Image (cartoon, rainbow, N blue to C red):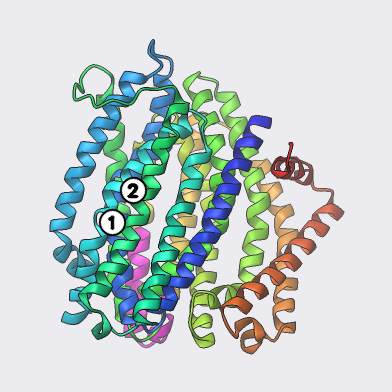
Amino acid sequence: MSSLGRASAVIAAGTLVSRVTGLLRTIVLVGVIGSVNAGAADAFAIANQLPNNVFSLISVGVLTAVIIPQIVKAAADADGGNAFISKLFTLGTVVLVAITGIATIASPWLVWLYAGKEGSPEFLALATAFAYWCMPQILFYGLYALLGEALNARRIFGPFTWAPVVNNIVSIVGFLVIGALFGGPLTRVAEWTPEMIAALGGTATLGILIQAGILLIFWRRTGLALRPDFRWRGVGLGTVGKLAGWTFLMALASLVAGLVQTQILTEAAGKGASVATFQYAWLIFMLPYSIIVLSIGTPYFTQISEHAAAGRDAEVRGDIAQSIRTLLFFIAVAVAAVAAAAVPASRVFTNEASHAQAAALVLVCFLVCLVPLTILFIVQRTFYAYGDTRTPFWFTLFQCALVVVSALVAQWLLAAGVFEVTSLAAAIALGQSIASTIQTVVAVWLLHRKIGGLEIGTWMSAILRFAIAAIPAGVAGWGVFLLLGGPTGWTTADKVQGALGTCIIGVAVVVVYIGILALLRAPELKVAGSMLRRFLPGR
């Protein structure tokens, strides 16, 4: 447990700094291009989303699901997995270069695919111009993921987590320079010149390049010699390809679902919360997920992979139960805090108080699935640890189908006049949350069938305890928000006051949450306290 605690502390610290600087990056970006009712912001959001979506085809699942378990197994080879990793990296780089080139050439078509239905010619032209600058990110994201997952598999967790901080700093400096040179917020599509487009798109891509390059500095700590090796036969890459095939299809299904969402969201472009607001709300939603779930869950995934490779199923089941209970202890209070502070937190990413309320509604709709996604993180990766990528494909395909249906239903309800276009993004976010919740239930059931008892009773009792504490804590936090003036109070006056108000509300929620759990004598308090002490110097 001590090694897991130390690893979690390193990852959590890096993730926290990374996310905080990422928030600052987004704040500066909003100052340059706006957010709600900003055509330029939506154009850049679509263009900058494209490399992430294309990369997800080869990253989501393929790298995380396949690479860590396979490198853990390869470590038992006579050369410590050196040949396998060199061949894997050579093949991966070749594939990344090819995909990046194809995606860059296809930029106009991809932009049209996402926004052609609702976008004006000027909007599409701006998004395409941004896309040409952003597409090289696919290569750099891929190299970063390959290097980072290999480091994680070797239990070198720090560099992968801290490298994005440098990316954020580079972007912040670049965006500030753009703002100083060209002014802002530049919300109208017609305001953008080729020089401004190159500056914004180039800055975003430069940050990803540096983020990947930094990991090479730490490669020596793996003890492996990374060399180009085009002899790809005989080291088990066929197994990797078979596993990756299912995860590729899974990522493709997710990409299609996201495409449908974006196409429908563009109906609100320039009228209310649209693509950019949807992404910013998701960014806030992912803050507790990244800091808590990835920090604690990533070391557990490595341990689960080791136990699964050794055939120690009982220990895997124990890992699952322990990790989920630990994660949910922190996630429950995070849901309560973010929900209570949704408006001031959203104000940080908007230029007007009225826009914050629209963005907050989207954020709250996303929060519905934070607890289910936390459970899904461990359950899905347990399948990966057993080399099973086919089952996650099927329950992810099911979720993607639900996401598409929910987005289409939201579009139909909008056309029927059930709600205004300003609520479209929130309706789509809620549909995604419901789909993810159903997906988690199915995934847990399938894993239970695969490896037997998952100690689900201990999860449910823990969830009940956390809910008993989190619900009153959230209500108390909302009360603090109202005491501070509510939606028209000082916490929504500007971005800095929004951040300060979020912190005050969050502290109130945490104090009430811990106090109630202490009265209940929740056993998780001791475990959480032990884990938090890992952050202190000398621990």
Q: Amino acid at mark 1?
A: Pro
Disc 1 residue crowd, few under 14, some 14–19, many 20+, Cα 10 Å: many
Give the SS element for disc 1.
helix
Give the magenta range: 401-425
The residue shown at (74%, 42%) is 533
Position of 256 with respect to 378 (left or right) is left
In this view of the protein, which residue sits in the foreground, 224 or 118?
224
Is 109 inside the magenta-drawn segment? no
In the rendered structure, are the residues bearing label 2 and label 1 in contact, judged by CB atoms less than 8 Å apart?
A: yes
Give the SS element for disc 2.
helix
Position of 46 with respect to 74 (left or right) is left
Residue denoted by label 2: 141
Give x and y (percent) for residue 39: 31, 81
In this view of the protein, which residue sits in the foreground, 174 or 3?
174
Give x and y (percent) for residue 410: 37, 75
Image height of 511 relative to 84, above or below: below
Residue denoted by label 1: 51
Give x and y (percent) for residue 13: 60, 48
Q: Quadrant of residue 213?
A: top left
Image height of 384 relative to 211, above or below: above
* Residue 341 appears in the figure: yes
